Image: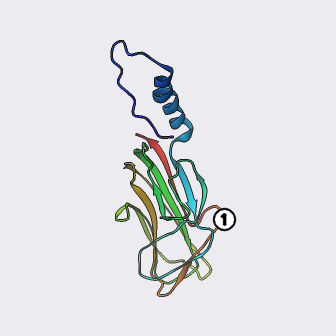
């Protein structure tokens, strides 16, 4: 269900059941329970090349109540649905395998090009330490805009992004308000 832009009533407008259902009941239901929300993840380790900022694919969902994510096409995206324009809270979390060499990055891009959240850190501090990074922010998005998690590492060779139950790699987005 999409949010319906409320109609402007004029004097002597009849308040029919259809009008009230469309502009009152359905919009209240959308804001209370159906507002866009998604949390997607990848359930396998991902071998990550060095020195290249690359989009992270997400093959599974914890929830998606507004068809914001697909597990079969454009699997990296959280897309704003029709009628879902507004301010969104979004974030991502990625855990890189232990490696003391180089840096790590986790970024969120809008529409594949514009950085709207970014974090870069040095590698693990110890040989057995993983590097976990969370990036979160808010941004005004319109219908068909999408956010993606991108990751970067510069260890000099391939380094896994670990699949960790309930937190890595994950991308989420929640509609806050118009």
Name the residue nearer the viewer: 122 or 14.
Answer: 14
Vertical comparison of 19 with 1: above or below: above
Q: How is the image coloured?
A: rainbow
Rendering coords of residue 64 (x, y %): 57, 52
Vertical comparison of 123 with 3: above or below: below
**Horizontal side, residue 153 vs residue 43: left or right:** left
Query: What is the secondary structure assignment of the residue under circle 1?
Result: loop
For the point 49% across and 69% down, which residue is it? 56
For the point 52% across and 51% down, which residue is it? 67
For the point 58% across and 79% down, which residue is it? 98
Can you name the residue that lies furthest to the top here? 12
Name the residue nearer the viewer: 112 or 109.
Answer: 112
Quadrant in the picture for residue 29: top right
Rendering coords of residue 50 (x, y %): 45, 83
To which residue does mark 1 refer?
165
Rendering coords of residue 116 (x, y %): 37, 59
Can you name the residue that lies furthest to the bottom here? 156
* Crowding at mark 1 (Cα within 10 Å: few <14, some 14-19, many 20+): few
Rendering coords of residue 62 (x, y %): 62, 56
Can you name the residue that lies furthest to the right here? 165
Vertical comparison of 9 with 140: above or below: above
For the C terminus, the quadrant is top left
Circle count: 1
């Amino acid at each position: 269900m999409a949010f319906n832009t409320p109609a402007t009533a004029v004097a002597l407008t009849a308040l029919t059941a259809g009008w009230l259902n469309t502009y009152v009941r359905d919009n209240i239901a959308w804001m209370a329970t159906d507002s866009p929300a998604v949390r997607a993840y990848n359930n396998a380790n991902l071998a990550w090349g060095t020195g290249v900022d690359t989009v992270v694919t997400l093959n599974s969902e914890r929830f998606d109540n507004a068809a914001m994510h697909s597990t079969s096409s454009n699997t990296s995206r959280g897309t704003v649905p029709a009628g879902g324009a507004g301010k969104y809270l979004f974030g991502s979390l990625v855990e890189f395998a232990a490696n003391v060499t180089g840096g790590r990055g986790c970024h969120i891009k809008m529409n594949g090009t514009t950085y709207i959240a970014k974090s870069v850190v040095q590698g693990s501090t110890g040989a057995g330490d993983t590097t976990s990074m969370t990036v979160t922010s808010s941004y005004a998005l319109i219908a068909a805009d999408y956010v993606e998690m991108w990751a970067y590492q510069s260890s000099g060779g391939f380094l896994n992004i670990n699949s960790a139950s309930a937190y890595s790699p994950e991308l989420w987005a929640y509609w806050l308000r118009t």
